[in-house]
Amino acid sequence: MSYTQRVLASLKAKYPFQPEFLQAAEEILTTLEPVVAKEPKYEKYKILERMVEPERTISFRVEWVDDKGEVQVNKGYRVQFNSAIGPYKGGIRLHPTVNEGVLKFLGLEQILKNSLTGTPIGGAKGGSDFDPKGKSETEIMRFCQAFMIQLHRYIGATVDVPAGDIGTGGREIGYMYGAYKRLTTRYEGVLTGKGLNYGGSLARTEATGYGTVYFTDAMVKDRGDSLQGKKCAVSGSGNVAIYCCEKLYQLGATPVTVSDSTGTIYDPNGIKVDVLKQVKEVERARLTRYAELVSTAEYTPVEKYPEGKHQVWCYKVDCAFPCATQNELNEEDAKTLLANGCKVVAEGANMPSTLGAIKQFLDAKIAYAPAKAANAGGVATSQLEMEQNAGMTSWTFEEVDSKLHTIMTNLYKNVAETAREFGVEGNLVLGANIAGFRKVADAMIAQGVI
Ligand code: GLU
């Protein structure tokens, strides 16, 4: 058995109850095969065994009082996965599906993603099984404060810098930041995604969605095509999906779908981004509200989805942008997209495609941009926020956006060249994993073993 397969087998034996983590590890380890075969030092220093085990996992109880005066108890975590190339960095997810395995998958992805940005940040992820849905403003605030009462000991501007993810946006970061400051008396860039009047960066909100489209633009241009005139299916309706739609319009493409956990919107005339922002950012409502406001929108509730498929992937489109959550696009969905002529898939969410779906895309040799490359613009701009905080300054929107554009274009080139170097031109899964891995692995070797 090869080195990578041995490491994968031992992970499967050790963590059978962490399916998402095993899925991410399998995707990564299988593609690292050629680089570990070529460079024996990685096996000699047991880099794979070390890289798949977090440096540290902190788990804690989060207790808070709801509006009825009842005590609530949640589980909180921070997985500090790898600090070889910089302070731990990664978002905080608040969702009932959060558990240690989910955060380990996200943390492992984050190590390589952060490395790919070309900036000095390590990999981490955190979160809680707290469900923000249906909670009042004050309940959200109390939860965020309770979460930070536990977390503040383990983070810091040069130690570990959390940010947003599903369920954690500007509002939650604000409450967490306020709690950190009160607990520590430190005014420092300990979180990113902050409000603009207390150290946040312009363009951070837009960055993940914009970055995904910048990456896609570079990828399709490299294939002699462009986004101009393309019809695009976008899933999700959070921050990533909204700004993915916005940037698609700016580059001449038309997003025709969005979705949330209750249903899918399809509008052949194009999604109305201003209405979407109103519904999701201001009203914090469901997409049924969008359907009420836009008469041309066709709404399909989840109960009406075709068996085993997601409605959002059933339309005839040129490009697909999964921007919702993990495993939202399965093998059947991939086949449907390909049968409908889809030639471009770029992942704004983390691990949205199952292993079966990825295989379909790679076999069909379409332009497929894996998450850790395509959605790296969010964390890259978080690092730009850290830079601004460290320099006690703030840059203009145009400055940050142009840096983001440069980062995503260079990231595409690096990943595409790495794929070429290993003789699999166009396989950006392998390109991203190897390019991200090498930098971290070499830093780990250079820093020795204690
Ligand atoms: N949660 C985002 C991600 O998956 C952003 C993390 C960050 O900005 O630190 O990359």
Image (cartoon, rainbow, N blue to C red):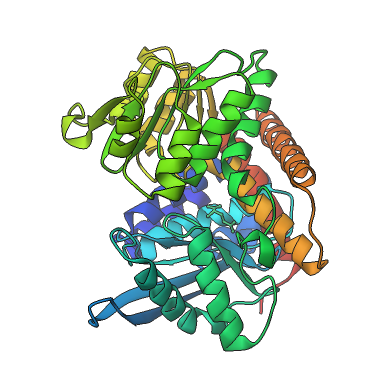
The percent coordinates of residue 220 (x first, y second) are 63, 20
**Residue plotted at (46% across, 60% down):** 168
Q: How many marks?
A: 0
**Residue 332 appears in the picture as rendered:** no
Question: Viewer-proximal residue, 111 or 176?
Answer: 176
Task: From the viewer's perspective, tell me whether residue 262 is left or right of residue 398.
Answer: left
Task: From the viewer's perspective, tell me whether residue 327 is left or right of residue 214.
Answer: left
Quick check: 33 above or below 329? below
**Residue plotted at (36% across, 52% down):** 20
Q: Which image quarter: residue 74? A: bottom left
Ligand 1 sits in which quadrant?
A: bottom right
Question: Viewer-proximal residue, 165 or 159?
Answer: 165
The percent coordinates of residue 184 (x first, y second) are 61, 87
Task: From the viewer's perspective, tell me whether residue 148 is left or right of residue 34.
Answer: left
The percent coordinates of residue 395 (x first, y second) are 80, 53
Quick check: 280 above or below 65? above
The percent coordinates of residue 205 (x first, y second) are 59, 49
Quadrant including the C terminus: bottom right
Quick check: 321 above or below 116? above
Question: Viewer-proximal residue, 409 or 138?
Answer: 138
Quick check: 236 above or below 154? above
